[in-house]
Amino acid sequence: MSTKPDVIRKCLWPACLVGLLITGILSLDCNLLHFHLRKVTWQNLRLLSSTSSSFPAECLSETKAFELPQEILSHTQPVKRYIKEAFYEMSIQAFNIFSQYTLKSTWESDYLKQIQIGLDQQLQYLEQCLEEEEQEKEDWKEMTEDGMNWSGALVPQLSSLELRRYFNRIDNFLKEKRYSHCAWEIIRAEIRRCFYYFQKFAARLRKK
Amino acid sequence: MLALLSATTLVLVAGVPWMLPAAAGGTNLKSPQNVEVYIIDDTFILRWNRSNPSVRNVTFSADYQILENGAWLQLPGCQSVASTECNFSSVKLNVYEEIKLRIRAEEGNNTSPWRYVDSFTLFEKAQIGPPKVHLEAEDKAIIVNISPPGTKDGGMWASDSSGFIYSLDIWKNSSSGERKTKTVYSRDKIYELSPETTYCLKVRARLLPRKTGAYSPVYCIKTAVENKLPPPENIQVEAKNQTYILKWDYAQENVTFYAQWLHAYLKKIPGDNSGKWKQIPNCKNVRTTQCVFPKNTFHKGIYLIRVRASDGNTTSVWSHEEKFDTQLQITLFPPVITMKPTNNASLRVYISAPGESENKPVNHLYPLIYEIVFWENTSNAERKILEKRTDFTFPQLKPLTVYCVKARALIQDERWNKSSVFSDIVCEKTKPGNTSKTWLIAGVCAALFSIPVVIYVMKLLFRCISYVFFPSSKPPSTIDEYFSEQPLRNLLLFTSEELTERCFIIENTNTITAVEETNQTDGEHKKYSSQTSQDSGNYSNEDESTGSKFSEEFLHQETE
């Protein structure tokens, strides 16, 4: 039994890496919103990693493998919109977790509020961008007479499903553990690790 | 022959009882066709078509399999059903799990082969059902209260409680009925409607990125009488130094205003938020249509602001909830311009943010473009250009002229309409045009080079003219090579110039000897010519021709 929760490393991987991809790729679309989106996502990540208390030793035995969906990460040339959608999916799921269990959370309410505010900002920007693109696509569809090839639509749906399954596992984990302090700490440690990867990846992306 | 006949009859007889049961549908039931899964919210329905229409008493049973397990379990609600559809909503499954279904027809003990359905997850096939809508009329607006589709706490949309986006179509019940579509929160208000008019609307829920739900039924409601006090309009927030200024428009006077704020994220969470609005400091009972409050009231995030008016007795309804994002409050500072005149009568312009040197790159927090106004100091004609680069040149200006430049920063997106004030004016004089110098030097060089060329050409021309109009009497120099002897040369050279005496050829057997003789005689002629110059005048013409003839003949002989 590994003491280091490397199983947790896999947890929220899609959150991290998809977010990473966003920071680099979103900068090409949606006019000005991407600037703010980048800033906001960065702030959120820093916020989530700002907790100073260390991981309690007694919770190590309760760790679980959440199994990141590897398929999302294996795409070598992700389409921008697909990335945005996956990122939106991740954000809304994370927001859901944080908002559903505010009463059952052992974190300070202020901290939780900050996270929710930050995620909401992210979501609003993404929503606007995706709506705009949807509108453009609709207009373009009207212009082009022939039927669109929707095979590309299957790919994002798959990743959206994977993300949902993944967050479903986190959700079930919290429920199983009855929102115990340990369960929240495990989630918190996971998120902190997420930030670490996020930073590294984002740095690499910006070089491009 | 007979044996053959009997054999075939035997086969036929044997075959018939074997075939008849099949026609009757005994052991060869066909499996159902066109099997489809149809899911709306938490209702799961399986549909199919019969493939044995003639057979009665056919029932159908379905099983399901969770892909990871491998065991086929009975699908609840779909065991021995007589119709062509069944509802299996009671199955206890995770909506994100991949499952596979199979169905077959049964009649007594006979069963058809299984018809399989490709693996799927309940979530991907699920469609969003209509949301529940509750309406309330207030003043000129309609308050909508939308409940998300599906069951509360669990079910298909358990993890989407905050994720639904609602699209609302509204139109006037009467006449034209022009439809407007809006995106609304689950608890929202529709403004800008006419009082005492019946409006009809329908709502549908959406899940980004791709799921769009069914419309709710159409609901109609009549708006109320207009309140004496209308709500304030056109709420705006401006940033200034360390404060925010909240402004709004209001037609009437002698009213006080009250402004409130709310975290925007609370709108996403289902539930009643009416108790969560908080007062904006310095914005209670203000008499002006604006109030100033410190910047640190709002930390980073998106907020909603609403204002209402009150005249002591009555209060207006709340205004439209204006979204305010602290991070989108940008203060643009005017850029700093430095100009340098370069060669070729051009000016190189460097734009930098205040506080930075011209060599450092501008730190872009936002994508800025610069509007540059450019004019000659003496004239008023201004040229405006939009430039994205921070280091560029104005080329080909007038030399030794003073030009002035001022610039301001703009956000690249026109929607934002934000700009800084203009920077200070910077003027510079251009250098003398290097071009004129260059041309001068080039011209001089060209002239210098052209002189000998011209001379040479003139010379050639002159030679040509003199050759044509003033031919030279000199024979070509090649003749000199062959005639080094003086007398012969004299003969040849002087044939056209000197008048020669006529000679009578006595014997003309050999042309050479004749020529030699004539040569000699010519020599003597010379002696005589000086003495008998008078006579020679008569014969000069002929001699000329014969003389020339001789030279020609001689030349021809030489050349042979």
Image (spheres, rainbow, N blue to C red):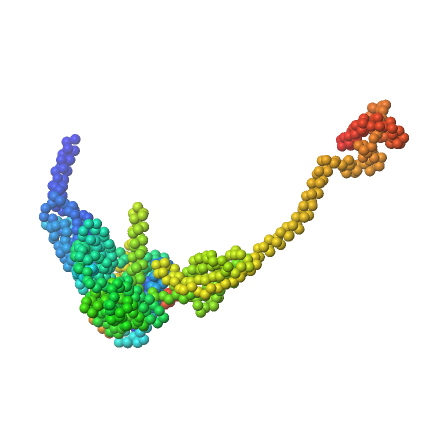
Percent position (x, y) of residue A74?
A: 34, 60
Picture residue at 31% right of the left edge, 56% below the top? A132
Q: Residue at x 29, y 55 (%)?
A: A134
Q: Is residue B46 left or right of residue B240?
A: left
Task: Work out which quarter of the rendered image holds the N terminus of chain A and state it.
Answer: bottom left
x and y percentages locating residue B325 in the rendered image: 31, 66
Residue B140 seen anywhere in this rendered image of the structure: yes
Q: Nearer the viewer, residue B398 or B434?
A: B398
Please name whichever residue, B468 or A56, is drawn nearer the observer in this view of the structure: B468
The relative height of residue A145 versus residue B550 in the rendered view (above or below) is below
Residue displayed at 42% across by 65% down: B334
Q: Residue at x 29, y 60 (%)?
A: A127
Total numbered circles: 0
In depth, the one of B419 and A206 nearer the eye is: B419
Residue B470 x/y as whole percent: 74, 36
Q: Tell which residue pokes out farthest to the front in this image.
A: B254
Q: Residue A109 occupies which quadrant of the picture? A: bottom left
In this rendering, the answer to whether A69 lies above or below B18 is below
Where the C terminus of chain A falls, by quadrant?
A: bottom left
Task: Answer left or right for B97 relative to A81.
Answer: left
